[in-house]
Amino acid sequence: LLRWNEVRYRKKGLPRGTMGWPIFGETTEFLRQGPNFMKNRRGRYGSFFKSHILGCPTIVSMDPELNRYILMNEAKGLVPGYPQSMLDILGKCNIAAVHGSTHKHMRGALLALISPTMIRDQLLPKIDDFMRTHLNSWDNRVIDIHQKTKEMALLSSLKQIAGLESSSMAQQFMPEFFKLVLGTLSLPINLPGTNYRRGLQARKNLVGMLRQLIQERRASKESHHDMLGGLIKIDDNKYKLTDDEIIDQIITIMYSGYETVSTTSMMAIKYLHDHPKVLEELRKEHLEIRGRKRLEDPIEWNDLKSLRFTRAVIVEASRLATIVNGVLRKTTEDMELNGFVIPKGWRIYVYTREINYDPFLYPDPLVFNPWRWLDKSLESQSYFFIFGGGTRMCPGKELGIAEISTFLHYFVTRYRWEEVGGDKLMRFPRVEAPNGLHVRVSSC
Ligand code: HEM
């Protein structure tokens, strides 16, 4: 079977590599060995090789220059190639499912909602208000930071989207959203009891709730200063969207910021716990801001801009933990890439993990050292892929950093914490704490 599978995919012009078993390919080895799978293959075949993972024939690219080229050249037929389950559950107007002018339109509509001006005037006050309440009454308790940061990411975006964070709708929303997330990472087999079926059902329920909310908003004629208000107030907006597009846009915002923001926040807390000197420096930055304010004064735009060390802590946590291992693309036609011919419809895994540990870019790459980011130019170097690159570069980068910074502000100025211990962290294929990350919290 192994040999038959190799012959089946033996086409002139393809890069070297192995295809594993029919249907399953090399997925099991990939998931079990994690980053070592990639390193072993690179040792054998170079940094551009073929494999069959996650249900598709795939080219893995570990070459930074080539990765940059792929990200910058969507127009040449290198479009997002996310799994079918994700596309089905996130909707056909989801930003990852659209290309060309439709992508430009959806992205424009999104950027109008989360621009720096919007963060300053509308979103930051909501984020601040939310974080204060979310972090209330943690004193003298054992808290599961993994759980809390997940709730934080979702509820904070529900507040920004439609002021829903403490409504009964949020309580109905949350379990459905968690089922949707699980469904997007499942095999697309629509049978009772599968995560895929549950995810589709959860999408249907969420769409129903959002549709009702949009109808109520339209009927009330009241104007709302939140993301949904911005999406509905379209007559004077060049990025006019249909109701279906508005719904998929909202699901996109919640989904894209959920795992990224929650996991980065959790890992920041973990690294701060393990590195007291870094924590001291970070706390100093936040206490300086608090010192100038009354207790009830919110974090404002200028405060956020002054949090240089906090930003460095967040980026360093994303780098060292590698929150995003890479991004997926697929070819829309047979194409030549790096001297090879990649057949139409193959996936390209733009694997960006290794560049995070490059000793030339990051001396002592395995050390948690936020100070390295204080030289701003490191964030604009050509191989900074933590937030993607090219036309799909993360539009939520500054919003995500604003959320995590505000969360850290209230956490480090109000509390001290120590790990209860024994919790395991998984680093691959996703960063997570399977049994939670428990800390004992006491007030400062
Ligand atoms: C701090 C945490 C975050 C990280 C590490 C992160 C990372 C990324 C990465 C690597 C991509 C590129 C995906 C690709 O090329 O296929 C991306 C895209 C995207 N991100 Fe983020 N992200 C973060 C926060 C957010 C937030 C808070 C939002 C909320 C609006 C968001 C919305 C998006 C969207 C909509 C895209 C797709 C853009 C497009 O296809 O044009 N992200 N993000």
Image: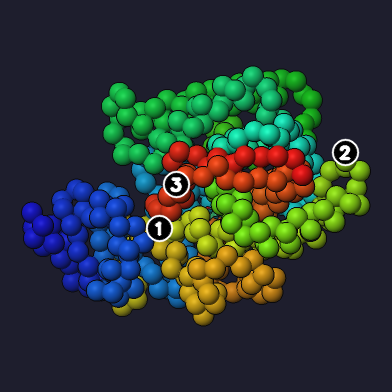
| Residue at the disc numbered 1 | 329
Relative to 291, is 278 above or below?
A: below
* Viewer-nearest residue: 351 or 217: 351
Distance between the alpha carbons at the discs numbered 2 and 3: 37 Å
Residue 83: horizontal and vertical position, in percent? Answer: 37, 46
Circle 2/circle 1 CB separation < 8 Å: no
Mark 2 or mark 1: name the one nearer the start of the chain: 2
Quadrant containing the C terminus is top right
Residue 123: horizontal and vertical position, in percent? Answer: 75, 43
Distance between the alpha carbons at the discs numbered 1 and 3: 32 Å
- Tell whether circle 1 marks a residue whose Cβ is less than 8 angstroms from ligand 1: yes
Q: Give the amino acid type for the residue marked by disc 2 in the picture.
A: Glu
Can residue 275 be seen in this snapshot? yes
Residue at x 79% of width, y 49% of height: 120
Q: Give the amino acid type for the residue marked by disc 1 in the picture.
A: Arg
Q: Left or right? Give the position of 360 relative to 224.
A: left
Other residues around mark 3 within 10 Å, as few (<14) / some (14–19) / many (≥20): few
Label number found at residue 296: 2
Q: Left or right? Give the position of 295 relative to 72.
A: right
Residue at x 71% of width, y 35% of height: 139
Residue 269: horizontal and vertical position, in percent? Answer: 61, 50
| Residue at the disc numbered 3 | 424
